[in-house]
Amino acid sequence: MNPDKAESDFANKVRFHLSKDELERQMRRIHDRDDSVDGKNRSAGSGSSGHSRITNSSTGLPRQESWIFESVGGYFLANEDLARMSVPRQEQLLMRDLIYSFSGVPSAYVKPDIQIDQISEMSSVDIAKVRFRLDEAFNGAFRALANEVLPMIGYYISVQSYIEETNMTPNCGRTRLALASALGNQLQEYYDLQAKLETDLQEKKLNLKELVRQVRPWLPILKSFSSMACSARGNLTSAQVLTLLDQTYRDQKDTDVDLKERVAIVLASVSRTYMKIVQLWMQKGVLFDTQHEFFVEDTEPSTSMSSTLLAPEKCCHAYWAERYRLMPDRLPGFLLSLANDVFLAGKYLNILRQCNVSMTLLQLPLAYNPSDLEHEEIIKNSYELPAQKLLKVLAEEHNLLLHIRNLKSYFLLQEEGFSETLLYKCQEYLKYNVDRLIPEKLQTLLTETLQKSNDFFKDMLRCQLKDCDVATQLERHHKAQRAEEEQEKESSSEEDPPEVLNLYGYEALAFRYEAKWPLSFVLYPELLDQLQMLQRVLLFLHYVKHHLTVLWRSPSEGTGLKLTNQSAELRHRMLLCMLSLEHHITQDIAEPRWQSLTLTVDKAKSIDEVVNKLETTVEECLRLGLLPSANTFVKSLYTLGHVCLNFCDFVESSMGEKSTKELEQEMCEYEKEFNSFLASILELVSQLAKTKDFGERDSCKRLLKRLEEFVKFSEADKDHSSNT
């Protein structure tokens, strides 16, 4: 058998990956053949050996003694002994292995510290710690030059494995698929570079220094892409993936323009699907989110259509407050500051649709580019269109401004002569227990009171009899607020039954304003309930003031006041005290805030400006008018008012039956009781004035200033009476 032919056949076979058994058989045949050839060479002399070396070098094949077989990536490959190679040959071999390694192909001369399969499962931080090492037999200068770009191997494996896994995984989500596609598009230029390097290597046009120079720019690029790929792994929502990609863009240095531009292109491509959902919701009011990626979720069944008109009794503020739900975990970070505009734009479009309002919708393409703010301008315009249109509809077609003024007139009892006329007509009924009252009769009296009013919407005002006092109603309101803050659902049916109270008509009478749709979107029941609590307190003060005034005006009922100066002075102080408590709520607290509300409503450009200002005004009037500790203050206020009513009853009942001395003794008892309760209120307000909130502290100080005058007046009067 010809030895040269045997070596040629073996060289052709070794190009393929061989199994371990096949390699062992080939090795035994080679060793057997080498023994026979060596025997002939020794007998032929040194001249024959020299001829053999010349023949092998002329064929371009290495001598068989330089082959080493090692396991690389699960395969056994034939490697050459680097120690016997020339420097140019080492450079060519190193460049070949580097090009293959940059493509993720296993190599015997470039090895990581760990199993190469583990790289695809590691985080970006751990990948940066993986060390790729060159064979120590390589020239030192070559190794120093190549070590600079070796980390790129791990980054590429991480990116490529993510692309392959995502494309092979069903139901992985549109955002992950978009990221895999965007990374693949960006790597196309990298693939072209690899092909060019391999061609230059085969044509002997490439050296190691040039190779490193050409691949060096891709090191930071692949590092960033690897960070993106690693971030997208795991159980993350589309919004969380977009947030991480956006943060990757923010972390890039402005000096590296090319890298930042590449990351921006990837982010814009990946966010395109999400931004299309945003655009459809904001500009059409349509929620098309089959994979539940969007941060707005419709609570209605999927079969219901947004364009279907609802029944009037169903279409209310409570319905629209619960129809759409926010999902914070589906909100990308770059839309966080715009989330409210996005949410309300689509919601208002559907409200306008329910109102049968026709309008021209926007058709502006919406995309996210982190390098500019164009998307913010489009989102702002998409929100302003329905928000302004809804305000225009409510203001021009449903007289929203007039209804807001009515709230002040009726609930804060600011309509001239309204409360006096109503109390005069109802005085025979309000002194009875609430169980004996008929709401229809009171409604008739209210209608008679408003008969001469010029208000076109006076019929929307209704009266009702509450089953609890104001303190209990306030407690329920505060409990509902706490439950909402704690995201707990506490229905009134689950609460303890209200305490059975012996309420009189003047304590139970309350107003309600029957706002129909779409006015009920702004004037909703929860808001009106807060005003109703203020109205009940003010009506009680007016009732007490009315009775104290009657004692002065009616000679038949006020005869007792003429018997002693002390009784007249006490009645006068009680009347001024009730007036001061009323003026604190209406003039000190409500009036300046309602003036600010009126200015805001007149200049408002969107419905949210009106709604937010109205809610703030009502909340501040209730909180500051009835003080931070509303329950305790209201109970004390009602107790003081009942002392005044008892005083009135005493004066009316004691007419002509008691002597002046007996009356004076009784008056001293009432004065002492009045002073005691008034002092307790002042002490309570003084404690509440220590709060850190400026508005609450200022409110308490204003009330103290009003009431302290009566305390001083009372003490002086007591000294005067004792001296007498």
Image (cartoon, grey):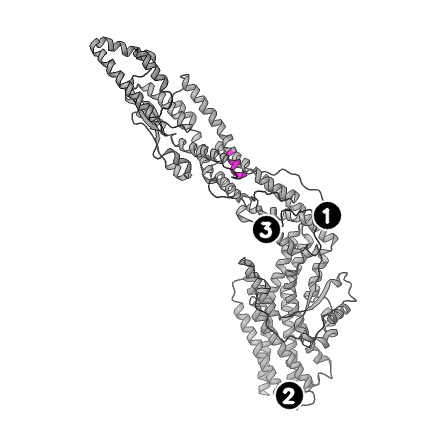
Q: CA distance from mark 3 to mark 1?
A: 24 Å
The residue tagged 2 is 663
Q: CA distance from mark 2 to mark 1?
A: 71 Å
Q: Which of the marked residues, 3 or 1, is nearer the chain's N terminus?
A: 3
Quadrant for residue 10, please give it: top left
Observer-nearest of 1 and 75: 1
Residue type, numbered disc 1: Val
How many marks the image carries: the answer is: 3
Residue 325 marker: 3
Residue drawn 76% across the image and 69% down it: 444
Q: Position of residue 512 (x, y in %)?
A: 69, 64
- Which numbered disc flags the more N-terminal residue, 2 or 1? 1
Magenta residues span 173-180
**Dot 2 amino acid type:** Leu
In the image, residue 676 lies at what x, y percent? 56, 79
Q: Are marks 3 and 1 in contact (CB under 8 Å)?
A: no
Magenta span dominant secondary structure:
helix
Query: What is the three-letter code of the residue carrying label 3?
Result: Arg
Label disc, if present, on residue 357 of the rendered structure:
1
